[in-house]
């Protein structure tokens, strides 16, 4: 029988990362701090396991290795399916092991969806509100099964008919009473550290989970925030992420933060990541930001269509918006967020929103609408007529949108973002600020001139080499293997394993760069006197055959990147459209390093495109769009402090595709 004094907290990291934005799991550390701070639980061992792995067996092995009797899962849209499978396997192996789900996706409404109804039997309880004290009391009860949870307030217990609520837990009003992970040494000082100043939200936008959280008047005191900022400064935190609903939606909390910052000065050097609600921006907020040299701000626009915003209960003053962005852009890096597929919007209104937003002096990021629990899933008007994918929660059709219309706008976004060398990820499209787009265009032109010069030099070198010796010719037999959806033609000599690695890399890059609109059909290498890597890629327009060879052996090339010459061809002499051509350029920049290795040219000398942070929800990026603090939550990895002996080392699982 698993030991209830051994607790495992599981958190799957999302793909949210960038040069300066490097978050880590925070909600689970709030739970961890609550357990370690309670003297009644001095004998409890806490094991924190986090990874990007989607391999259920790897997670199961970690839990079984520590023989945890209580397992808390942080569930987001990206981790929900994997963690339910982990819970199923753990429950089948040890029915007495207590399985508790928290985080934004741990809601009865999720289990009402067809794919997850059977999973109710594998879960003992959900925590749907602030989880620190509820989970602490659960662990204190030393449960050895579901029946032992019925007296713990604040839970939703699994039953044959769904989930049944236990007695309400006392509302957490005194946030200062919560132990601080930062001051307990449970954070990673070298990463982007989350920072809270209040909980809840005064708004009730239908598409956002924030609007259904607990009371928005609960704040952390000035004294608490002084201690927090001091701990972050002393830990050497390079940046902090404000995980509140927005910087300017709680005036008392903002005053406490501003006063604490004046005393500590963390943001004189550290980067501040925060969301700003445009309608309520004041001179006091601008004055605060003027003292933060490196601020990165997300501003939720969502739509310029008033009817759309009214349908989704989003208050907005259009007359102020342009000036707000102008004011903020003088002080910080600003990103305006737009949602594709909101109920009540339309393709025409959506394009007008994007085109108007792109005229602003800032970056513009578009998200595909997600039907989140505690948001559209449970609060949308019946007239919204929504259909959505129960696995990804992606909107498929709704009032104003057909499936065909949404697909067409997604394709349009890929084309438009490709034209300006923007960023594309799953359900996200990002346009650079106008000034940045102009700089990138100039850089591309300079790169093209450099590539042309390199090609000319390579031709001359090749001609000189040919005049003194004849290249040796070697033929290798090949065999075909079916791997995934792409056909791999692998050499019978050493290197076929590397080729399969390249296939995975190519497939991943195509998904990331094109948002899944392009896919790999076939990959091969053939040795016939010169090394050559050949890819067949299916685009929206046609199939494209891309070949990579050493630049010294290619007299003419479409692109030369770090010694690799790329060419492409299409059926009947076709050509890619301008937008598709820019997407191909981005793909090649990401793949040239792998091509060098396959071609025997050694490691890449030029870095691929910088990664960018990617959000997971309607208009709030990855910074709080799915509610924080509600039992086990998520984001990235650290090693726990040796100063806390009850904490076992944080385990990182290998990433599985």
Image (cartoon, helix red, strand yellow):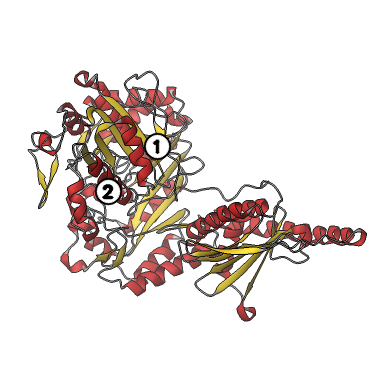
Splitting the image into 4 quarters, where does residue 13 fall?
A: top left
Note whether residue 12 is visible. Answer: no
Q: Please rate how many residues cluster around mark 1, counting C-alpha atoms within 10 Å: few if below 14, some from 14 to 19, many from 20.
A: many
The correct choice, above or below, for 628 with respect to 391 in the image is above
- Where residue 24 appears, as percent x and y from the top left, is 40, 37
Give coordinates of residue 459: x percent, y percent.
82, 62
Camera-nearest residue between 36 and 609? 36
Q: Which residue is mark 1?
A: 24
Residue depicted at x 70% and y 47% = 602
377 vs 539, nearest the viewer: 539
Residue drawn at (27%, 23%) of the image: 36
Q: CA distance from mark 1 to mark 2?
A: 22 Å
Image side of residue 226 versus residue 436, left or right: left
For numbered disc 2, what is the local secondary structure?
helix
Q: Residue at x 9, y 53 (%)?
A: 161
Q: Position of residue 547 (x, y in %)?
A: 66, 65
Crowding around mark 2 (Cα neighbors within 10 Å: few <14, some 14 to 19, many 20+) is many
Asked whether the beta carbons under mark 1 and mark 2 sit within 8 Å of each other, the answer is no
First in residue order: circle 1 vs circle 2 = 1
| Residue ranking furthest to the bottom | 572
> Between tags 1 and 2, which lies in front?
2
Q: How many marks?
A: 2
Residue under numbered circle 2: 84
Asked if residue 231 shows in the view, the reply is: yes
Q: Is residue 52 left or right of residue 39?
A: right
Query: Which quadrant does the N terminus fall into?
Result: top left
């Amino acid at each position: 029988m698993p030991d209830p004094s051994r607790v495992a907290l599981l958190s799957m990291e999302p793909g949210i990362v960038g040069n300066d934005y490097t978050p880590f799991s925070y909600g689970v550390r709030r739970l961890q701090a609550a357990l370690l701070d309670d003297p009644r639980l001095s004998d409890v061992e806490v094991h924190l396991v986090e990874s990007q792995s989607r391999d259920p067996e790897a997670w199961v092995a970690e839990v079984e290795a520590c023989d945890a009797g209580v397992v808390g899962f942080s569930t987001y849209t990206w981790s929900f399916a994997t963690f339910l499978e982990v819970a199923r396997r753990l429950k089948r192996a040890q029915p007495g092991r207590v399985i508790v789900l928290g985080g934004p996706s741990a809601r009865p409404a999720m289990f009402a969806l067809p794919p997850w109804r059977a999973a109710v039997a594998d879960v003992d309880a959900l925590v749907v509100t602030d989880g620190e004290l509820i989970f602490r009391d659960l662990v204190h009860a030393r449960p050895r099964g579901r029946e032992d949870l019925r007296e713990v307030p604040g839970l939703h217990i699994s039953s044959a008919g769904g989930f049944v609520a236990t007695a309400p837990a006392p509302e957490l009003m005194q946030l200062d009473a919560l132990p601080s992970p930062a001051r307990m040494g449970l954070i990673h000082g070298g990463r982007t550290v989350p920072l809270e100043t209040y909980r809840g939200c005064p708004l009730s936008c239908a598409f956002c989970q924030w609007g259904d959280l607990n009371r928005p008047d609960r704040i952390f005191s000035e004294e608490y925030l002084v201690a927090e900022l001091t701990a972050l400064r002393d830990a050497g935190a390079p940046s902090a992420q404000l995980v509140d609903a927005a910087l300017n939606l709680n005036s008392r909390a903002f005053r406490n933060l501003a006063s604490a910052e004046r005393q500590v000065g963390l943001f004189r050097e550290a980067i501040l990541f925060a969301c700003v609600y445009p309608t309520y921006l004041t001179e006091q907020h601008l004055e605060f930001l003027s003292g933060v040299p490196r601020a990165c701000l997300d501003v939720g626009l969502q739509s310029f269509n008033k009817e759309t915003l009214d349908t989704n209960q989003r208050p907005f003053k259009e007359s102020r918006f342009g000036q707000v962005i102008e004011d903020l852009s003088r002080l910080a890096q600003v990103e305006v967020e737009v949602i594709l597929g909101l109920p009540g919007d339309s393709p025409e209104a959506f394009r007008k929103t994007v085109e108007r937003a792109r005229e602003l002096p800032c970056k513009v990021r578009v998200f595909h609408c997600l039907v989140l629990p505690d948001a559209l899933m449970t609060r949308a008007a019946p007239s919204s007529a929504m259909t959505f994918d129960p696995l990804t929660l992606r909107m498929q059709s709704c009032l104003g949108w057909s499936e065909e219309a949404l697909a067409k706008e997604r394709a349009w976004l890929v084309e438009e973002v490709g034209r300006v060398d923007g960023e594309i990820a799953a359900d996200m499209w990002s346009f650079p600020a106008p000034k940045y787009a102009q700089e990138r265009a100039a850089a591309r032109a300079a790169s093209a001139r450099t590539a042309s010069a390199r090609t000319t030099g390579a031709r001359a070198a090749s001609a000189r080499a040919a005049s003194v010796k004849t290249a040796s010719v070697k033929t290798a037999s090949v065999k075909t293997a079916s791997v995934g959806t792409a056909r791999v033609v692998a050499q019978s000599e050493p290197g076929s394993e590397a080729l399969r690695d390249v296939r995975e890399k190519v497939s991943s890059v195509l998904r990331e760069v094109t948002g899944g609109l392009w896919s790999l059909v076939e990959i091969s290498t053939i040795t016939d006197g010169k090394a050559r890597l050949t890819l067949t890629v299916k685009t929206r327009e046609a199939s494209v055959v891309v070949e990579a060879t050493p630049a010294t052996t290619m007299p003419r090339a479409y692109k030369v990147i770090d010694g690799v010459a790329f060419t492409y061809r299409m059926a009947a002499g076709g050509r890619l459209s301008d937008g598709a051509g820019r997407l191909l350029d981005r793909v090649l920049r990401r793949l040239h390093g792998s091509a060098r290795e396959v071609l025997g040219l050694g490691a890449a000398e030029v870095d691929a495109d910088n990664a960018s942070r990617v959000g997971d929800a309607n208009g709030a990026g990855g910074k709080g769009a799915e509610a924080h603090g509600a039992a086990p939550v998520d984001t990235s990895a650290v090693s726990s402090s040796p100063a806390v002996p009850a904490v076992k080392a944080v385990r990182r699982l290998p990433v599985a595709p």
